[in-house]
Image (spheres, rainbow, N blue to C red):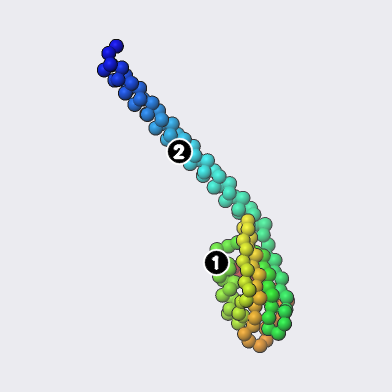
Amino acid sequence: MNKGTIITDAISYIEELQKNVDELSDQLRKMEATCVKDEKINLEKNDAENEMKIKPEIEVIHINGTKLWIKIVMQKKRGVITRLMEIMSALGFDLIDTSITTSKGAVLVTFSAEGIHVGVPNAAQMKEFLFKTINNI
């Protein structure tokens, strides 16, 4: 064997190895893509199951005068916080000390609401109104 034949054989062998690497890389990418899709489906399924279990919980306490403290635990939905804030504003309340926390498909919202107008609904009426409103969002 001469040097030219050895080099030619080595180049052919390296090209064959590179082709095998490319084929195996493609197979690995396909397998990873399938695993990622399966994980996404499982996560979405788990999120949907968690979300279905959440029933709204509302607590309203009259602090004084026209001021209420409100705590709401509800299912996490797109736009629900914005809609809730719009409703409270439309009812004539300024929201003070608002806190929002999300976890596993649930949202916890707490805030103080101070009525701008005289004739603020009592705590029980506000709770009932918020419960109906949240169920319709």
In the displayed structure, would residue 122 be above or below residue 81? below
- Residue 65: % across, % down: 71, 85
Can residue 135 be seen by looking at this rendering?
A: no
Give the residue type at disc 2: Arg
Image label count = 2
In the displayed structure, would residue 137 be above or below residue 105? below
User: Which residue is depicted at the point 31% across and 23% down?
Assistant: 11
In screen coordinates, is 108 left or right of 38?
right
Report the Cα–Cα distance between label 2 and label 1.
37 Å
Mark sitting earlier along the chain (2/1):
2
Q: Secondary structure at mark 1?
A: loop
- Residue 15: % across, % down: 34, 26
Q: Secondary structure at mark 2?
A: helix
When asked about the image quadrant of residue 70, the answer is bottom right
* Residue situated in front as seen by the camera: 13 or 75: 13
| Residue reaching furthest to the bottom | 118
Q: Residues within 10 Å of mark 1 (few under 14, many from 20)?
A: few
Residue labelled with disc 1:
79
When asked about the image quadrant of residue 79, the answer is bottom right
User: Which residue is depicted at the point 58% across and 68% down?
Assistant: 81
User: Which residue is depicted at the point 49% across and 37% down?
Assistant: 31
Give the residue type at disc 1: Gly
Image mark for residue 29: 2
Tell me the quadrant of the picture where the C terminus can be found. bottom right
In screen coordinates, is 26 left or right of 103?
left
In the displayed structure, would residue 23 be above or below residue 106? above
Image mark for residue 46: none
